[in-house]
Amino acid sequence: MMTDSNPTHFLDIDDVSRDELLTILDRASEYKRAQRAGDDHAALEDRTLGMIFQKPSTRTRVSFETGMTQLGGHAVFLGEDDIQLGRGEPLKDTSRTLSRYVDAVMARVFKHENIEVLAEYSSVPVVNGLTDDAHPCQTLADLLTIREHEDGFDGVSAAWVGDGNNVAQSFALGCALTDIDLTVATPDGYDIDDEVLERARALGGDPTISTDPVDAVTDADIIYTDVWISMGQEDERDVRMDDFEGFQVCSDLLEHAPDASVMHCLPAHRGEEITDAVIEGDRSIIFDQAENRLHAQKALLSWLLE
Ligand code: CP
Ligand code: NVA
């Protein structure tokens, strides 16, 4: 294991520059090709990833673990209740200890400040596997998926419909980095944070903010939604179900965007933010997104550890 007093962390998508982002996406495409062809791409032999989870996961857990195996390395699952963190050991002690064993840490935590603490005390790269505010690994996969389906980023327009949540916030930053023209339609009170919009604008993005899903999706190339009730918000279910009425991605909404592909980070709540027919329909590129988590994160890890 090698440690670095100043490792590169990946806490949100704007921790990488445009050029670095394109390098990672190019490498992801190459790993995707190599994996499908059965070509050797064992870039992380003998390297170990520690994976802290304070929330459940299917895609993030399995794609990181499988990705490390495919790269010749190893991943260790560290559920909060399986390690001393769950009994109150401070994050800073957990981070300093893990840094002595593993080559990188991926963590899914509630408060974004907690991933910042992990990074502050870590001598190895820390990767954000989702916080309440950000989901940059999802954005990496989303951008890879858009680039594949739209043949690049030039002239692409995207509409986010629903909650201005963690996935939306990182996606907005990712659009700014790739010059995707983004419109965000959320109900009043569920907007993307002003601080995130400022960061998007600083990157040259100019997201249009709306409360009208039809306006937002009209003639879009990409329509993207996510759950209305994120992990940790279960107590808000009744209020949110009322507040998000009219924001469902359904066949009627798709009529306003005849060429649009539909994205969802999954897991989806069919009948709430999206219909079963849209998920199963021929506009859906949702399972390509899910697959691309694997390729994008392999590229990210090998880039962070080279
Ligand atoms: N999209 C995503 O992060 O899925 P999981 O919660 O299953 O990891
Ligand atoms: N916004 C969702 C994303 C899950 C991958 C959540 O935080 O629960």
Image (cartoon, rainbow, N blue to C red):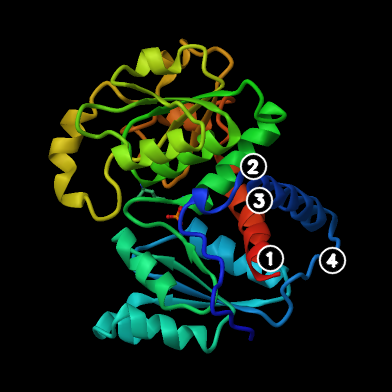
Give whichever of discs 3 and 4 has the lower sequence position: 3
Count of picture labels = 4
Mark 2 vs mark 1: in front: 1
Q: Secondary structure at mark 3?
A: helix
Q: Are marks 1 and 4 in contact (CB under 8 Å)?
A: no
CA separation, marks 3 and 4?
A: 24 Å
Q: Is residue 7 left or right of residue 82?
A: right
Give whichever of discs 2 and 1 has the lower sequence position: 2
Q: For the point 55% across and 30% down, which residue is it?
A: 284
Mark 2 Cα within 10 Å, few/some/many (few <14, many 20+)?
A: many
Mark 1 Cα within 10 Å, few/some/many (few <14, many 20+)?
A: some
Q: Are marks 4 and 2 in contact (CB under 8 Å)?
A: no
Give whichever of discs 2 and 3 has the lower sequence position: 3
Numbered label attached to residue 20: 3
For ligand 1, tell me if the residue under mark 1 lies within 8 Å.
no
Where residue 116 sits, quadrant-wise, is bottom left
Amino acid on which disc 1 is placed: Ser
Q: Is residue 183 left or right of residue 244?
A: right
Q: Is residue 78 left or right of residue 91?
A: right
**Residue, disc 1:** 302
Q: Secondary structure at mark 4?
A: loop
Residue 239 lies, in percent from the top left, at: 13, 37
CA separation, marks 3 and 1?
A: 13 Å
Give whichever of discs 4 and 2 has the lower sequence position: 4
**Residue, disc 2:** 144
Q: Are marks 2 and 3 in contact (CB under 8 Å)?
A: no
Mark 3 vs mark 4: in front: 3
Q: Secondary structure at mark 1?
A: helix
For ligand 1, tell me if the residue under mark 4 lies within 8 Å.
no
Residue 102, above or below 253: below
**Residue, disc 4:** 40
Mark 1 vs mark 4: in front: 1
